[in-house]
Amino acid sequence: MGQNGKRVVAVTGNEAVAEAMRQINPDVCAAYPITPATDIMQRFTSFVSNGKVKTEMVLVESEHSAMSACVGASAAGGRVATATSSQGLALMWEILFIASGTRLPIVMSLVNRALSAPLNIHGDHSDGMGARDCGWIQLWSENAQESYDNMIQAFRIAEHMDIRMPAMVCLDGFIISHSIERMEYLDDETVKNFAGEFKTTNPLLDIENPVSYGPLILTDYYMEYRRAHAEVMSKVSKVVLDVAKDFEKISGRKYGLFETYRLEDAEIGLVVLNSAAGTSKDVVDEFRNRGIKAGLLKPRLYRPFPYEEIGEALKHLKAVCVLDRADAFGASYGPLFMDIASGVYPHKNGPLLINKIYGLGGRDYLPEHAETVLAELAEIAKTGKVKTLREYIGVRE
Amino acid sequence: MKPKGWKELKPGAVVTEAGSAEKFKTGSWRALKPKWKEENCIQCLFCWIYCPDMAVRVKDGKRGEFNYDYCKGCGICALECPGKKGQKAIVMEEEGK
């Protein structure tokens, strides 16, 4: 036990997520394990078997069923959590919309993995990007510490009475899920108090007040429900920041809608999600040492996407490269690029933007990749000319 | 009733009023209409049991006239009706005839 009840540990990202789930002690967890998220459920089911949590564990026959059971349990009035990856998330897709449309605050960790075919089990953001418009809140995490911290905060955000929306906590498959890092755990009591008692809204199990879930809503009201959903999403940013403020008090760790690294006076910058941000920051430092004003922006709240705030944070740069660990097929830009471009678009004198697709299927993202990109950005900043708007990097010709 | 705006809706489309389906009249969907022939009715109430909505009225254990506000013309009542001496107590007729 360290200072203020914090425990310094060496754990994998999956272990950290499972520990957050143990400390939250959800009422129900329905899951179908899948690589690389398997380990989360393997550890969590051990907590269930050993009486470390009071969670009702439902082992189902597919991810479609896992999310369906989560929807039922959440509508019944329980605090619900699960975990998945890749094909598992793809199979849940239909039910993801039902969870959000029904306003059920389910929390799920998504260990990002490439989608088939070809079959691949490694880190890639194709799965999370495929579900970016399904009405869930998405928090992305650079390392095990952020995965753990985001997981704990996700319950407070999802369950907030102004929000009541499901939330996904994303971390990179294998790179984070299976690598051991030094991090800090909060003590059980602190997490329990931070998460607070779960409050129900119209629980199915309240037989004194019978309710119906899942009615047919046709042309006369469907659009009004979608408008109401959009309104809720517009309130998420504020709640995320409020929860982050409270979390800082118990952890000493500061979170925002996104992280900026040496960005304030930067002329060129990288925008990148999750684990690749760590490698990129090292290279930003190298460029700074050489007198080149480089910086970085790492989105944390990816859905709803804080377009205005990110536009403001990037508008003073001369050139920015958005790095996408997923492609959006159709010869267009990567998904993160499209969001960043939308954020920068209102700023007339904003930066020139380029897009690189990297690291698909777990392909290593190396410091030399960041170096090449930053060197290209420095050239663009100098000449004002972009040679290639979008390309793959780290790929054999 | 004036339709509600988006700010007035229950979150997640949850219906919190029990029995509110009564307010939703679906009889206009019908193409075929069941007709009750009381003279062939043995009061078995199969029609009342099998009706998926609430189109069969029953009072004091006796079958009454159809409530067409909820009848979509599925024909289950007519199919299940045992009738009397081979004569059905419910027959389906084309709507509008």
Image (tube, rainbow, N blue to C red):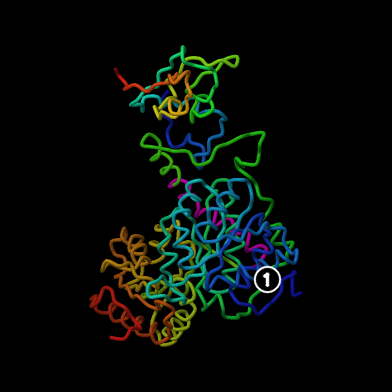
Other residues around mark 1 within 10 Å, as few (<14) / some (14–19) / many (≥20) = many
Q: Quadrant of residue A252?
A: bottom right
| Residue in the foreground of this view, choosing between A329 and A259 | A329
Which residue is rendered at x = 28% and y = 81% of the image?
A379
Q: Quadrant of residue A70?
A: bottom right
Which residue is rendered at x = 48% and y = 72% of the image?
A274
Q: Type of residue at label 1? A: Tyr
Residue B78 percent across, percent down from the top left: 43, 25
The stretch drawn in magenta includes residue B58? no
A266 lies above or below A231: below
B69 lies above or below A160: above
* Prevailing secondary structure of the magenta residues: helix
Q: Secondary structure at mark 1?
A: strand
The stretch drawn in magenta includes residue A243? yes
Q: Is residue A231 left or right of residue A240?
A: left
Q: Which residue is mark 1?
A: A185
A321 lies above or below B76: below
Q: Quadrant of the N terminus of chain A?
A: bottom right
Highlighted magenta segment, given as a residue range: A230-252
Which residue is rendered at x = 36% and y = 60% of the image?
A343
